[in-house]
Image (cartoon, helix red, strand yellow):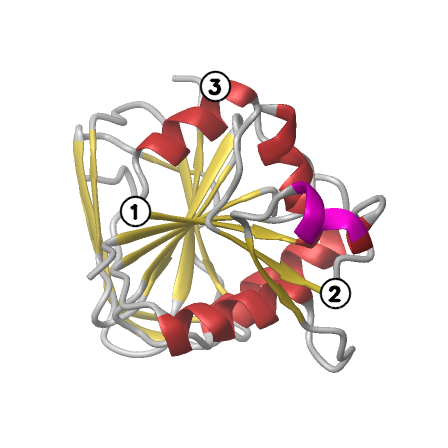
Amino acid sequence: MKKTCLMVLAGAPPSEDLLMWRIEDSDYRIAVDGGFLSFTHADKIPDLLIGDLDSIPDSDELENKYPELKIVRLREQDTTDFEKALNWVVANLQVRNLIVLGALGKRTDHLITNLLVASNVDEPLNITFDNDDEWIRRVTPSSPLVLNGRKGAVISLLPIQEVSGVITKGLKWELDGEKIGGKRILGQSNLCESDLVEISCQSGSLFVFLQKGK
């Protein structure tokens, strides 16, 4: 079982330091379309390249240039490249953690779409979006969050759909079994008051946004 899968999208590219750390910390590495360029700029080759590959120059030459690279070309336009890659991971890999780089920055509509897509993936999968300034983690009933060492950091809880039974520990303003989403949004610009923060819910899924730098 491959415990951690790294997926790099074609949004704002991660720094080389962040990319290298995530590469070293993962068991399987996927480039999603233009995310392949982040790997090649760092002189690295992923285990898999997937998408319609319309963001890669000379994509027809990839098989010749990188014979060791597994390539899955999916040209249908009914789903986003991120959705195609997620479907491939669910169908072909058994992973516990999915780390996504290149999803933050550039276009906000792409980010919102990525969050909507991620909110519907199997509950047990830990999904984390990361860049150099911000970190986003999905929380579901079977994927609670335990966060260490971030006392003083700004943290926000964003429900993409209605979420019930939200419980937090270690925040300045705690939630104790709250229902959030729809007209009731609680959780923006909270603070980590402890180096141990726990966030869970009983139904639905929400995203925890952590600002880096502290």
Segment colored magenta: 61-65
As drawn, 96 above or below 212: below
Regarding mark 2 in the picture, which secondary structure is present there? loop
In the visual, does 162 lie left or right of 63? left
> Label 1 sits on what residue type?
Asp
Nearest the viewer among 168 and 131 is 131
Regarding mark 1 in the picture, which secondary structure is present there? loop
Cα–Cα span, label 3 and label 2: 28 Å
* Percent position of residue 98, x then y: 37, 54
As drawn, 46 above or below 165: above
Question: Mark 3 touching mark 2, by CB under 8 A?
Answer: no
Is residue 78 on the magenta stretch?
no
> Label 2 sits on what residue type?
Asp
Q: Earlier in the sequence, mark 1 or mark 2?
A: 1
Residue highlighted by disc 2: 52
Looking at the rendered structure, which numbered label has been put on residue 27? 1
Q: Quadrant of the N terminus?
A: bottom left
Cα–Cα span, label 3 and label 1: 18 Å
Q: Quadrant of the C terminus?
A: top left
Residue highlighted by disc 3: 17
Is residue 62 on the magenta stretch?
yes
In the visual, does 214 lie left or right of 201? right
Q: Residue at x 40, y 78 (%)?
A: 91
